[in-house]
Amino acid sequence: MKKLLALALALVMVLGAASAFADYKVAFSQIGQESDWRTANTDSIKAAIENHEGWELIYDDAQQKQENQIKALRNFITQGVDVILFTGVVSTGWEEVLKEVNDEGIPLILVDRLPDCIDQIDYVAAFGGDFVEEGRRQVAWAGEYLKSIGRGEEEVNVVIMEGTTGASAQVGRTEGNLAAIEAYPNMKVVGQQSGNFTRAEGQALMESWLKSIDKIDVLIAQNDDMALGAVDAIKAAGKVPGKDIIIVGCDSVKAAFDAIVAGDMNATIECTPLYGPFVVEAVEKLQAGETMSKEIIHPEEGAFDTDGGIDLGTVVSVKAADVIDQRQY
Ligand code: AHR
């Protein structure tokens, strides 16, 4: 009987401790679902929160609209959430609402696309891709690849398919693309426009470029979804993607690996969406009262292509076929 009582008491204590955190509300303002990358990002973060004992996920999908994100952030404040995870569809226009979050004393964790007012607001942790470096790697891959096949001196026409205008991923990758092209005098930009990070708009933009530009040798697409849309447009125009037009994407989603193995794309520069583990670590530290560094954390990322071995200065590309089975997204 005594043993039974002790067991019941222990159970009450364990349940009591768990319930002390049972209503810890983790709110996540997501941009939308424009790409395979975004789906993987949503799944990674949602699963990490939902599977964590004592945490409740409050999720909002803003459908690519900044006004929806602003509304969501204000709703989170009204609901009295314990922490907010935030990524901004564009980089500007967040100062007012993020200061409201700060004034309410709700800890803010910045993920993926960081706001340009980052120095004017309080946040507990920030992690996201190094977009400038990703853009630089895209062009460096094309330039070095051309050299490796003996076309380093040939004048080649390049089109740059940009992401959502004003998104930090678009701003950073464009900066990296244009800075890197300076090192390759044989590469000339003949088209530069937004395909909004979606497959459909990538396809439409490529269709229009194929009609209006006489010769396109290289496509730099700031994400894989747009590159894959462009592949469809190139095939429909009777050309051979990956051969007539060299295609470099970004993100390294599974579909891009499949396209590289099939010969439809040439390379993809990695940008990881798998932020679930980062979020868990940061929120656990927050709950434990630990202070975190304000430094922006960029995960380690690679580059993948048909044959591997292209030296991009900061990383050497890996043959996609060798690692396709390990892709998680
Ligand atoms: O912010 C990351 C970018 O957003 C990814 O490269 C793109 O696919 C997504 O839509």
Image (spheres, grey):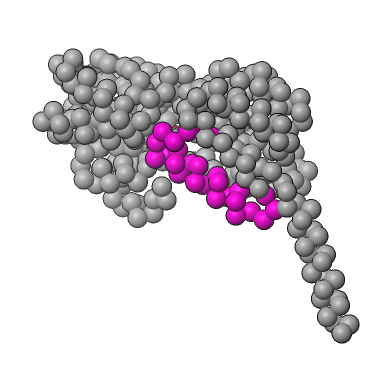
Position of residue 123 relative to residue 270, above or below, is above
Q: Give 307 or 220, whichever is nearer the viewer.
A: 220
Give the quarter of the figure containing the N terminus. bottom right
Question: How far across and how far down the image is residue 80, in percent?
Answer: 73, 36
**66 is higher (above) or lower (below) than 304:** above
Judging depth in this view, the residue of 135 and 221 nearest the camera is 221
Residue 323 position, x and y percent, is 34, 52
Please tell me which residue is depicted at 31% across the width and 44% down the height of the picture: 255
Q: Residue furthest right?
A: 2
On whether residue 33 falls in the magenta region, the answer is: yes
Q: Relative to residue 61, is residue 207 drawn left or right?
A: left
Query: Relative to residue 285, is residue 114 drawn left or right?
Result: left
**Residue depicted at x 22% and y 34%:** 231
Q: How many marks?
A: 0
Q: Residue 323: tell me if it is visible.
A: yes
**Relative to 1, 157 lies left or right:** left
Q: Is residue 182 above or below residue 308?
A: above
Decide if residue 29 is on the left or right side of residue 96.
Answer: left
Q: Residue furthest bottom?
A: 1
Residue 242 on image: x %, y %:
20, 35
Classify the position of ligand 1 by quadrant: top left, top right, bottom left or bottom right.
Answer: top left
Residue at coordinates 42% horizontally, 23% vertically from top-left? 164
Q: Quadrant of residue 151?
A: top left
Which range is magenta?
30-55
Compare residues 254 and 185 and report the one nearer the observer: 254
On the image, which quarter does residue 18 sit in?
bottom right
Q: Is residue 312 above or below residue 278?
A: above
Give the x, y percent position of residue 280: 63, 47
Residue 107 appears in view: no
**Residue drawn 18% across the image and 30% down it:** 234
Q: Is residue 189 located in the magenta-colored stretch of the structure?
A: no
Q: Quadrant of residue 191?
A: top left
